[in-house]
Image (cartoon, grey):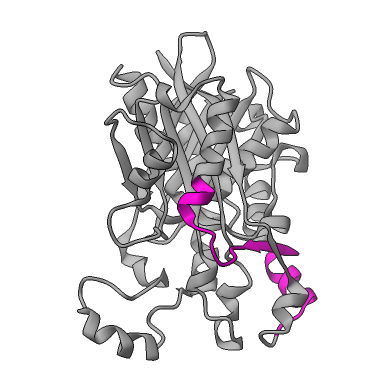
Amino acid sequence: MRSLILGTGRAVPARVVTNDDLAQMMDTSDEWIRTRTGIRERRWIEPGDTGVGLGTQAARAAIQSADLAPADLDAIVYATSTPDRFTPGNGVYLQRELGITATIPAIDIRMQCAGFIYALSIADAYIRTGAFRHVLVVGQEIQSTRMELTTEGRNTAVIFADGAGAVVVGSTDAPGRGVLAFDLHGDGQHAEKLWVEGPGALAPPTNWEQEQAEGRFWLKMDGREVFRHAVARMPESVRAALARANERVEDISLLIPHQANLRISEAVQKELGLREDQTYNNIQRYGNTTAATIPIALDECAGAGRLTPGDLVVLTAFGSGFVWGSCVLRW
């Protein structure tokens, strides 16, 4: 028995923020941003929007796509590094919003940009062992409220954005279909290369005002180091996952990389020797939505007819931690 993606969904805020909009907030330009990231625009939340709200929209779409009802779910795995609250996590709020009265488990994980792949691996294990029949997997982020919208913070402010994507995973015994293999890694030596230092449990709330004044609440990134590691680790991980699945790079129908930076995606594509039509990118329109990038792209591809049964699809991601991983599946 294998796990199979039965349905997909996505949700993004209504507010579109262009590069020209950002140029009004900091010393930057459309050309500067596109040259370095490939991004033309992104979505940011407006007052009243919530992460759980985005997750709920994406989840409802995925459940409908799978021809199921919320009551058919046996578990939720929710990946986000930007939960609406310190505690509890977004998973139980999503459970409530979906109207699920059964006391199913709602699991929250924080694996940043690799969050969706890690969440999918958890759902896959539950399905393979027969523990659950249907698992909802959500990747969602709100990054716009955690960025320094000044010239000093532009190396992150122009990249990160908000959104949610979801899939429903079920079981299949169809030959050649479903999730085939994962490859997962972490290396804490580089944790401070991409991080938000505060607020956290190490400092009491009485110290938060000082931490905020010192800029510790803003997302910080060593872009050069992140790029260097990402373009090496992602192709390495793809090859490892393919080897576990007994598949070959040349047989990939579609590679969906985490949308960190268009230049990273292009470098990964080149390293793997793939054609442009074998790689999907949408960072130009959505920016980097962290754990949401891959499920958003999956839903777009499914809706556009880019995925047909039997296609060999590879997902790969790299992000803060550093953590990274890949998934190989037959659609």
- What's the residue at 37%, 18% (across, down)? 133
Which region shows up in magenta? 28-55
Q: Nearer the viewer, residue 86 or 203?
A: 86
- What's the residue at 64%, 30% (across, down)? 252
**Tag count in the figure?**
0
Q: Is residue 71 above or below residue 17?
A: above
- The answer to whether residue 108 shows anywhere in this view is yes
196 to the left or right of 307: left
Residue 102: horizontal and vertical position, in percent? 30, 28
Q: Quadrant of residue 190?
A: bottom left
Residue 132: horizontal and vertical position, in percent? 33, 21
- What's the residue at 21%, 79% (across, down)? 203
121 to the left or right of 113: left
- The answer to whether residue 291 shows anywhere in this view is no
Q: Nearer the viewer, residue 168 or 312?
A: 168
Residue 26: horizontal and vertical position, in percent? 66, 86
| Quadrant location, the C terminus | top right
Residue 104 on the magenta segment: no
20 to the left or right of 224: right
Q: Nearer the viewer, residue 116 or 187?
A: 116
- What's the residue at 74%, 76% (across, down)? 21
Q: Nearer the viewer, residue 136 or 280?
A: 136
Residue 38 on the magenta segment: yes
| Quadrant location, the N terminus | top left
Residue 199: horizontal and vertical position, in percent? 31, 75
